[in-house]
Amino acid sequence: MIVLHTLSEYRNLRRNFSSEEQTVGFVPTMGALHEGHLSLVEQSKRENDRTVVSIFVNPLQFNNAEDYEKYPLTLKKDIQLLESVGCDILFAPSKDAMYPRPVELQMEFGAITSAMEGASRPGHFSGVGVVVSKLFNIIQPTRAYFGQKDIQQLCVIRQLVEDLNFPIQIVSCPIARNEKGLALSSRNQRLSPEGLELASQLYRTLIITAEQSTLTTPQQAISVGLQYLKNYPDIRLDYLEIVDTIQLKSLSSFTVREPFVICIAAYVEGVRLIDNLIIQA
Ligand code: PAF
């Protein structure tokens, strides 16, 4: 695997791929890699001639300084994991390489960011939009792979690609879970064994809420989910929402024959975790 740290190094290499008309699959990450990331890399490898992974903990998308400072940095281990799945190129720029001067650019995504992560983390999606646009311009991938766990981010990226005409296919990949159903996340590394056990209740809450969806209204289904969570007072809930899968608007009834998604965000041992479950109507 080739490891590059500067934009010019990557651009020199990218020129060769263009001349050989090779397709490039791209998996943007913030490192602290887990099986979920590796499954994106494996999918990209199956679908492209070359696979590039980026590791960059993007300060612009953290609205909480402590969250940024505590974000796990595990570059050495990440390199080993990427080598084990045959990643071709790792692009791991420094903060100065990505942001040689303070960024003034702000991005607004409108209605799709008005609730959930957009509401709870002001400025987060602007920071994601800026860094992903920069990475797309640098990497120039044919396809880019994103996990469905960050479903609102996925909708933002799709909107970004459409609005700015990036010639890139966005591929959404299923959520990887551990044996207890907990969605794999870099943030799980900050949890104790008890915290990990407790965090699996987020998935259980999604399942219990989903079980109500054939019987009741979204509001009633959410109430059942909230009631279940009361058994776990150490989980600090941010939101439990049922929304459509395109605009992420709150669902008022289950009568429409459209898929919907149940989304949850909560703090366990002070670590913010998100998860969701898409229900095909
Ligand atoms: O999903 C992530 O890890 C990040 O938001 C991304 C897409 C790498 C941008 O920093």
Image (cartoon, rainbow, N blue to C red):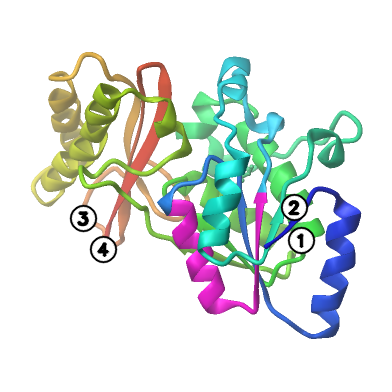
Query: Which mark identifies residue 255?
Result: 3
Q: Is mark 4 on a helix, strand or loop?
A: loop
Q: Which residue is drawn at 35% across and 17% down?
A: 269
Name the spot of residue 35 as percent of width and height, x first: 41, 52
Q: Does the magenta stretch include residue 135?
A: no
Foreground residue, 16 or 183? 16
- Quarter of the rendered image showing ligand 1: top right
Residue 257's disc number: 4
Q: Residues within 10 Å of mark 4 (few under 14, many from 20)?
A: few
User: Circle 2 is placed at which residue position?
Assistant: 135
Residues under numbered marks 2 and 1 in contact, where contact means CB atoms less than 8 Å apart: yes
Whole-number angstrom distance, CA of label 2 to CA of label 3: 41 Å
Mark 3 → mark 4, Cα distance in angstroms: 6 Å
The magenta stretch is: 36-54
Residue 28 visible to an observer of this rendering: yes
Of the two numbered discs 3 and 1 on the same chain, state the one appearing first in sequence: 1
Q: How far apart are marks 2 and 1 (CA)?
A: 6 Å
Is the magenta region chiefly helix, strand or loop? Answer: helix
